[in-house]
Image (cartoon, helix red, strand yellow):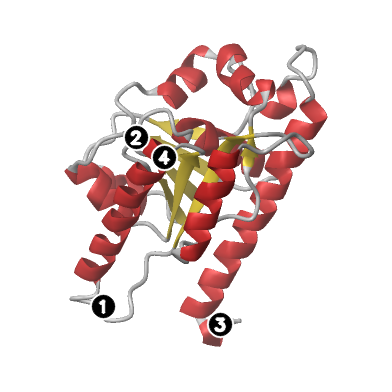
Amino acid sequence: MPVIAVSNPKGGAGKSTTTLLLATYLAQGGASVCVLDADPNQPIMDWKINGSSKTSLKVIGSIRESNLMETLDERREQFVFIDLEGTASVLVSRSIAMSDFVIIPVQASAVDVRQAGKAIKAVKDEEKVAQRSSLYRKIPFRVLMTRTPAPGAPVSSVQRQLEAELQEAKVPRFNTSLAERLAFKAIFVERLTLAELGEHKVGNLEAAYQNIHELVDELVQILYEIDRKRYPNEQ
């Protein structure tokens, strides 16, 4: 199963929200999923320990560079998400180096995009280091636009400009964006999964669920293509 790092050196870009939404959706679908909460604030660990969700999702906290490799080795049969801290560190570098795929959440602001550039550089730097021992080692990544307007709502000129800049620079990004939804905030407030929020009035829950459904579908397809290229004779 793949190891997926969620990284951006800027706080508030949506790393923990992205991680929790993807992980809980996959777990609900029957996948074996684990989150390594490497954020110093431990938001996902708090969600798991202090909440009442019935999800099968496993969450492990107190992740350090000293125990990262051992922790990953123990979970080879699972989807593993690593919710990384918002600063450059040995743990961030090592997590990226050991990942099969990196998601870089970005809000539509110039500051976020500049910080995303640092995250992209970190991925490419770790890829170069890895290629010293394995020439064809790749660490694929995608930028994920977060807190975007809901479908049909006006899109700001800033977002349009940033999207154009990403396209011009040929930066790979998800076709699906993560919209600004009350339900995405409510999962941390209520400490429940998106599917468990039915009795809570949290805006258009159906639209929020459809959004994450589309994002997971795209993620699974990307991971399939990565695996197919890595092991062409096993398809």
- Would you name the residue on which mark 3 appears? 234
User: Is label 4 in contact with label 3 (beta carbons under 8 Å)?
Assistant: no
User: Is label 2 in contact with label 3 (beta carbons under 8 Å)?
Assistant: no
Mark 2 against mark 3, which lies toward the viewer? 2
Which of marks 1 and 2 precedes in the sequence?
A: 2
**Which residue sits at x=35%, y=29%?**
61
* Residue 66 percent across, percent down from the top left: 17, 42
Res 224 visible: yes
Res 23 visible: no
Q: Identify which amino acid the numbered label 1 is placed on.
A: Ser
User: Is label 4 in contact with label 1 (beta carbons under 8 Å)?
Assistant: no
Label 4 to label 2: alpha-carbon separation: 12 Å
Which of marks 3 and 2 precedes in the sequence?
A: 2
**Which residue sits at x=43%, y=56%?**
76
Task: Work out whether residue 77 or residue 37 is closer to the camera in this orientation and state it.
Answer: 37
* Marking on residue 134: 1
Give residue 189's quadrant in the image. top right
Which of marks 3 and 1 precedes in the sequence?
A: 1
Which of marks 3 and 4 precedes in the sequence?
A: 4
Mark 4 against mark 1, which lies toward the viewer? 4
- Would you name the residue on which mark 4 appears? 110
Q: Identify which amino acid the numbered label 3 is placed on.
A: Glu
* Marking on residue 10: 2
Task: Work out whether residue 147 or residue 41 is closer to the camera in this orientation and state it.
Answer: 147
Q: Is residue 43 above or below residue 111?
A: above
Label 4 to label 3: alpha-carbon separation: 43 Å
Task: Work out whether residue 183 or residue 176 is closer to the camera in this orientation and state it.
Answer: 176
Which of marks 1 and 4 precedes in the sequence?
A: 4
